[in-house]
Amino acid sequence: MHARALLRRAEPCLRNPTASLVRGIFQHPENARGELEHLLPRELSRRFDWSTLKLLSGSFVDEVLSGSQSDLLFSVYLDGSETLLYFLLEHQSTSDPLLLYRLLKYMVRVLDRWLKEKKNEHATRLPPVIPFLLCHAPTPWSAPLRFEEILDVPPEVLPLIADFVPRFRPLVDDLTATTDEEIFGRALTAAGRVTLWCLRNARDAAAWVAGFSRWVGLLRALDETPNDRAALPLILRYIFSVHEAAPEVILPRLQAALSEEQLETMATIEAQLIAKGEARGRAEGEARGEARGRAEGAATAARSLLLRQLQLRFGSLPPEVLARIDSASRADLDLWADRIITAAKLSDILDASADPPH
């Protein structure tokens, strides 16, 4: 199948390719560690026992926002005490001015669940929850990044209420404001670096092509461990799903650059995406057919009922009236049925001049 057709079918198959990529890559502690360490202050990062880093299950994002936010929660020990690292991916197209309010809710949910699972409802101390924010909007993040900044009070009042309101800021990785050189220079796994690079450049065909030799080198490196090899399908699916240059430009380059085993993986993904696209097309076609059938059935029932009511009221109907009813829309059928109650003669029901003004 032509690459463009593949991409056209593949695009709707992934409901949220960005979230799928980030969760799929950074759920592995060896990939997440580099990103978390990069964002933490060095003096604090040194105090973590990174060998204890582990992913905890669950999501704390509001269901209504699950299409634009996703999250990961990690546990790690800090000087012998458990600490929770809450990693939020924000992938809306614009900066959310109330993000920190939502982030505060999610952090409270994290602690609520910690208490429930540890059966420490009567605990007198809680683990710290350190929030991280990964965002890649088309423009650099412009919303407040300190909680107190979203409070509706004059700036001169903030110091006076500082002791009485929540105060925190997340550790932010704003990919839009980051350079390619900075991403490639980070002490991340190959999977982590190529993921961040793809997120940063997802909307820029020229950047994908210009940086191809660098990021494809990272893809070739994804043969060293099982986790690396598991990352390759996630990255390829993301490329196929979000980038318009993939069919004509990137796909042929990938075919020339990847190893034989990686090309087999890519061929498998192509087949899966085609199959999913065809299945989705069939399902959507069937759904449209069922909806159309229901609508047509309801219109037929309304037409039969109207004819019966008119015949009972006025007797045999002229051929032109029958023809008009037969070709009428559902809206007209409903309108005429309403008029039967008060109409004195047949023309009062079908007269267009009696229609209500639009």
Image (spheres, rainbow, N blue to C red):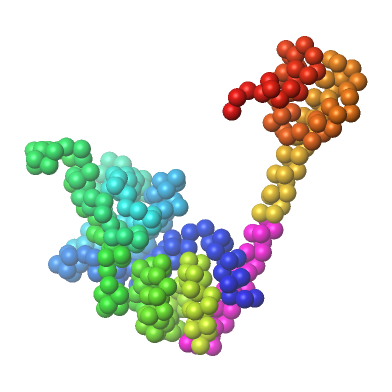
Q: Percent x, y for residue 355?
A: 67, 23
Q: In the rendered image of this protein, does residue 235 appear above or below residue 307?
A: below
Q: Which residues are magenta?
A: 257-283
Residue ranking furthest to the front = 353
Residue 37 visible in the snapshot? no
Q: As rendered, which of 81 and 36 lies closer to the eye?
A: 36
Residue at the location (76% across, 39% down)? 296
**Secondary structure mainly formed by the magenta segment:** helix
Residue ranking furthest to the right = 316
Q: Percent x, y for residue 346?
A: 80, 18
Residue 253 visible in the snapshot? yes
Q: Quadrant of the C terminus?
A: top right
Q: Verify whether residue 252 appears in magenta.
A: no
Q: In this rendering, would 331 be left or right of 194?
A: right
Q: As rendered, which of 45 and 263 lies closer to the eye?
A: 263
Q: As rendered, which of 75 and 330 lies closer to the eye?
A: 330
